[in-house]
Amino acid sequence: MTDLADRPGLATPLAEHLAPYSANEAVMEAERCLYCFDAPCMHACPTHIDIPAFIRKIASGNVRGSGMTILDSNLLGATCARVCPVEELCEGACVLNHADKPITIGRLQRYATDHLARVAPDPYAAGPATGRRVLVVGSGPAGLSAAGELAKCGHAVTIWERGELAGGLSTYGIIPLREPIEVALGEVAMIERLGVEVMTETALAEPAALDAALGDFDAVFLATGLGAVPRMDVAGDEHTRDGLVYIAQAKLNQPDPADAAAKHVVVIGAGNTAIDAATVAVRRGAKTTIVYRRTAAEMPAYQHEYEFALREGIDFSFLTQPVEVLTDGERVVGIRCVAMQLGEPDASGRRRPEPIEGSESVIACDLVVRAIGQDGYTGDSDFGLALERGYLGVDAELRTSRDRVWAGGDAIRARGAASTVMAVQDGKKAAAAIDRFLQSGSDTGSESGSATRGADHG
């Protein structure tokens, strides 16, 4: 059980894949660090945590100060300690890779942030009130990061969250062995105690709602994420499960009874969500196969996630394309596939998969889970904002095409890899830009209302 398990409101122990460090283990690992000047690990961190400083503080016994160093750069340091692809970022850049093994930066960060959550659950206070009001739409990592930073600046912040619980993918979309729900909700609670109002089951659904919000708030930050997993456009697709819903039900311990009883699960896709969905299935005792139309070299999941899946006993069927979900009445009995071969590169730069004639085969299964990405934005869901390749278009300061509206997180990830830590950095960056705008004395009521009138309507 980690330190967080002792906090009020956390009902269950945290069953994580990696055990927490003891104090002695943390100090021993911290003392391996070279505390590099101009450390490459720090440059590799999207939120630019001062990694040598926080590790040195662990070594010296100042664990609370270590946690504060982390949160000064990343308010969601406890989540990122668990879900960041550290093998690709900070640990991948560690100079000790060339001599021994990298410092376990993620586990040390988890040790420090968990300790801080226990001894100082309210590490920051809201700044002096500015009289400005900001709406944050979405309470995932980008939204929480922005809300917390804006509250520290003294702005009154309200979050609208369409789900029943706040926290976004950290709450719903990351399997418990990577991040227990208590960690995600603990960070939400910390942001709320900064004075941020979190309104769940409240959505921004259309341009008219954005117009109304701009009448009541001085600025809006859109951290809405993306949509559901798209359909596969094959016969029988209506009998498949959305991978994010499948993971969310497991995270909330509310699985569909039929899903939980499945004996052979096929997961379509090979990204990190597919790995997580397959892990849920295999840990329930099901034979689990990931089906992917390209090879291991092209799969979107990180290499360490692929290796983890192999250790879990998950099978992979590469160069395989589903063409039909087979059913007996309403019951799934298999999935018909064709073998693929790789042709010329497509727009993504990866070689295009092409079907091999006469290569049909059937994989027997009783549950098919789709994990093939998420729906982007269209003219029906774009809040009247300019788009870039199906994502909300923003400038260098994350401003959208609409005055007083910023955006970040997965909603804008037209380029580069989407990740929790990048979303946190977006929230920081947007909060700084919004604060500069609000503190500049700009006429925030130029479109459809003023700050004073908005406060009266609050």
Image (tube, helix red, strand yellow):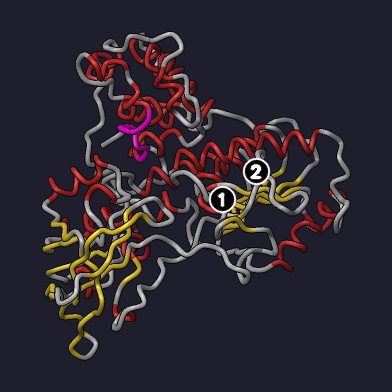
| Amino acid of disc 1 | Ile
For residue 243, which quarter of the picture?
Answer: bottom left
Above or below: residue 303 compared with residue 70: below
Q: Position of residue 164 (x, y in %)?
A: 49, 62
For residue 390, which quarter of the picture?
Answer: bottom right
| Amino acid of disc 2 | Leu
SS of the residue under disc 1: helix
Residue at (40%, 66%) from the top-left corner? 229
The foreground one among 239 and 458 is 239
The foreground one among 121 and 220 is 220
Q: Residues within 10 Å of mark 2 (few under 14, many from 20)?
A: many
Residue at (83%, 33%) from the top-left corner? 440
Q: Residues within 10 Å of mark 1 (few under 14, many from 20)?
A: many
SS of the residue under disc 2: loop
Above or below: residue 261 compared with residue 173: below
Residue at (88%, 52%) from the top-left corner? 446
Comes first in the chain, label 1 or label 2: 2
Quadrant including the C terminus: bottom right
Q: How many marks?
A: 2
Please name the predominant secondary structure of the magenta segment in the image.
Answer: loop
Q: Position of residue 18 (x, y in %)?
A: 22, 36
Q: Say the numbered circle drawn on residue 398.
A: 2
Contact check, label 1 and label 2, Cβ < 8 Å: yes
Residue at (74%, 59%) from the top-left corner? 213
Q: What's drawn in magenta, residue-wise?
A: 83-89
Is residue 65 covered in magenta? no
Which residue in the rendered view is the most extreme toward the bottom? 329
Residue for badge 1: 412
Q: CA distance from mark 1 to mark 2?
A: 9 Å
Q: Position of residue 406 (x, y in %)?
A: 67, 48
Q: Position of residue 117 (x, y in %)?
A: 43, 32
